[in-house]
Image (cartoon, rainbow, N blue to C red):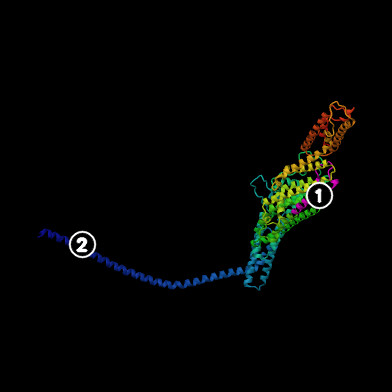
Amino acid sequence: MIPTEDASARKREIEEKLKQEQETLSFIRESLEKSDQLTKGMVSILSSFESRLMQLENSIIPVHKQTENLQRLQENVDKTLSCMDHVISYYHVAKDTDKIIREGPAGRLEEYLSCIAKIQKAVEYFQDNNPDSPELNTVKARFEKGKELLEAEFRSLLMRYSKPVPPILILDAIGGDEEIEVQEDVMLEHLPEVVLQDIICISAWLVEYGRNQDFMNVYFQVRSSQLDRSIKGLKEHFRKNSATSAIHSPAVQAKRKETPTKKPPKRPGFDHDLRGVKHLSDDKHGAATGKDDALDIEIDSYIHCISAFVKLAQSEYALLTEIIPEHHQKKTFDSLIQEALDNLMLEGDNIVSAARRAIMRHDYSAVLTIFPILRHLKLTKPDFDVTLQGTAASTKNKLPALITSMETIGAKALEEFADSIKNDPDKEYNMPKDGTVHELTSNAILFLQQLLDFQETAGAMLASQESSSSASSYSSEFSRRLLSTYIYKVLGNLQLNLSNKAKVYEDPALRAIFLHNNYNYILKSLEKSELIQLVAVTHKKVESSYRELIEQEIQNYQRSWLKVTEHLTERNIPPFQPGTKLKDKERQIIKDKFKGFNDGLEELCKIQKGWAVPDKEQRDAIRHAQKRVVSEAYKAFLMRCANILFTKNPEKYHRYTPEQVEVMIDKLFDTSA
């Protein structure tokens, strides 16, 4: 059982909790009642607010709609006024732009183009909205006037500022120091930058809005004239300042790049004494020199003009691409370069014609003018082809046609020269009296020496005339072999002709001296000018062949002394003892031998003293060999006759000592002795 005190306490505790719960419940009920009252009050307020909002909305919405309509009306009015102003402005365009259009675009291109744009918009408006209005004709006329003035300004700017390129600038552009590996390209400024930009701007407008290609014709006509004048100015510069231009212009060296050979002397010869060698035009050397100088100037001028054309044409194309529309560029460029190109090709044709006339006169040296020009044309052809890319076929073919003409006439000249060497007539009055080198020999060697500077060019000339299949794709080695064969042919023709000419001499000894001098001259010239290496490409033994010919003629010459030395032989001398008295017949034999030797020696020395052996080395060798033979024979003869009493006056027959004989022989081939 639970004790009584504990139960009472537990009861009191429960009653306390119950009382607290009852108080809490009363508080909650009171709070709920207050909340209901507040809710009822809020509902009443909201109901009143909703009622008032509905009343306000019913009042405001009509006002808002009226305001919105008024705003829309205002906007429509503004737009209408703006459109009216815009439309009205079209009717005033002609008047507003009249002054600027009449004064033209000079000095204010941007403002002028802005006026043109306004006129153009007016034209479009009237065409779309009122095509029958008189205003359309007015603005159209104003637009056409503006376009005409733009075209006139385009022409004016081009003509005013397009100037020929000064010759010095052209020379700088086409030249270059070969010793400098890197050289900056010289830029050719044809038009001032400000002017160029105006021209580009006008061109762009005419292309887009002008619908007229006349300005392109104007462009090529003006620039074509300047291109031609630039090249003519360079040519005139060469005529006036030929010497200075040739020295200071690096482009002169471009003519000599092909073959690194020594420059042959202008007149044939070597370091030996060549007295008596004859040359063409010796009597007119001064006049010929002046003519040659003038010709050299023309050649150099033409070569420079070819290079100048390429450089200037490239520069013109670069300028043209900035001004002319892309699809018209090639055609315009083709037209632009025609005048200058035609003039250059005509000048080239004239050179070919002059060479052809020279061949008809048998003046083959004049044909050599073609060689440097042809070589330069072939060296320049790749640049020509690139520059003329896209032009008409007739334009591209002009240079190849000129090259072909020059190759043909050059090959003809070479062949006819070889034939002329073979067929040169044997004229007695034209033969050197002293047996020196014939002018035919010196001129032939000079011609061949000058070919050394143009080996590839001359070889290509010969190859161009070959009909074999190999010629169609000839190599430089093939050309070199052809040239080697050609030179050997000329030398062969020359040798044959010299042999025939030598027959003019009645004296076999002079005939031998003549052939010896010519053969020796040919050999020394071949060796000195390096022609020997070129001939050796196809004929290895040419040097030894000439040495054999030279030696053979020396032997032929020495036979002339047999009529002197034959008197010194023991033939017909009777055997006798020293001191023995000779019979009259025997004494006469010895006297005749002395007399024959003396007379023969004097005669030969007198005759041969006037002959010439220009080569000192050969001259000394011939004298030395002759001295040895004659002196030894004479000494032996004197010893044989030393103790023979064949005359009471020995000094009458024993005129010369061996030493005196040698001195006499030493004076052979010496007209001053």
On residue 424, the disc is 1
Question: Is residue 84 depicted above or below 260 in this figure?
Answer: below
Q: Residue at x 64, y 68 (%)?
A: 122
Q: Residue furthest left?
A: 1
Front residue of this view, candidates 417 and 377? 417
Front residue of this view, candidates 427 and 479? 427
Q: Amino acid at mark 1?
A: Asp
On residue 20, the disc is 2
Question: Is residue 589 depicted above or below 77 in this figure?
Answer: above
Q: Residue at x 40, y 71 (%)?
A: 53
Question: Which residue range is magenta in the image?
Answer: 410-439
Of tags 1 and 2, the one toward the viewer is 1
Q: Quadrant of the C terminus?
A: top right
Q: Residues within 10 Å of mark 1 (few under 14, many from 20)?
A: some
Front residue of this view, candidates 596 and 317? 596
Q: Are marks 1 and 2 in contact (CB under 8 Å)?
A: no
Mark 2 residue element: helix
